[in-house]
Image: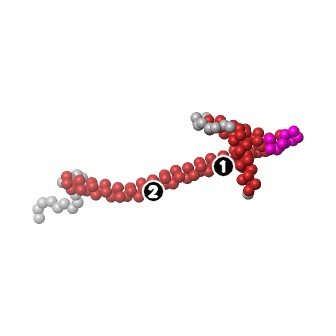
Amino acid sequence: DYGYEIVHALVTNITPNSVVREAMNEIEASRRIKLAVPIRSEATKISIVKEAEARAEASYLSGFGTARERMMIVKGMKESAQTWSNNESVSFKDVTDILLVTQYIDTLAAVGANNAILRSDPKEVSDIRTSLRRKLDGL
């Protein structure tokens, strides 16, 4: 027996054919994309849910703030009505008419700030008051 017997060999640089190399790269890329799709989908889902929760929370807080603002307006109007009604020369109806006119003017100012054109006849305030009273009396 002559020659060498190779027991182990370390191969460091294998260069397969370019077609084989491209096929192997495509297989690996497909495998990684397949693994990434569920992760990406879950991230998108979480993002959508968080955005919806944030919008819901903002709406809730906005509504809560509006409700508190209206409560304070009613409280102020009640205190004004009580202060005015202590004067015997002014009737409760007169006080409510004054408060309604004030609210009406404030509303006109707020709406007018947006360049809207509204009729501003004081008789309309009286008509609104009369209509509201009829509806409340009907309850």
| Residue 110 image offset from top left, x and y in percent | 64, 37
Q: Does the magenta stretch include residue 103?
A: no
Which element type, helix, strand or loop, lies under badge 1?
helix
> Which region shows up in magenta?
85-95
Q: Is residue 128 visible?
A: yes
Between 41 and 105, which is closer to the camera in this rendering?
105
* Residue type, label 1: Phe
Of the pair 88 and 130, the residue shown nearer to us: 130
Residue type, label 2: Glu
- Colour pattern of the rendering: secondary structure
Task: Please identify the residue farthest to the bottom as the structure is shown.
Answer: 1
The percent coordinates of residue 1 (x first, y second) are: 11, 64
Q: Is mark 2 on a helix, strand or loop?
A: helix
Q: Which residue is drawn at 73% across and 46% down?
A: 129
Q: Sequence-wise, which precedes: disc 1 or disc 2?
A: 2
Quadrant housing residue 121 = top right
Query: Which residue is disc 1 drawn over?
Result: 64
Question: Does 29 sit left or right of 117 as displayed?
Answer: left
Residue 52, placed above or below residue 81? below
Asked whether the beta carbons under mark 1 and mark 2 sit within 8 Å of each other, the answer is no
List x then y, in percent, for residue 43. 45, 54
Q: For the residues carrying marks 1 and 2, which lies nearer the camera in this image? A: 1
Which residue is the site of mark 2?
A: 42
Question: Callout 1: 10 Å neighbours few (<14), some, many (20+)?
Answer: few
State which quadrant residue 20 falls in.
Answer: bottom left
The residue positioned 22% from the left and 52% from the top of the image is 13
Instruction: Identify the residue shown where x is 24% and y is 56%.
Output: 23
Examine the rendering and report whether any part of residue 11 can be seen.
Answer: no
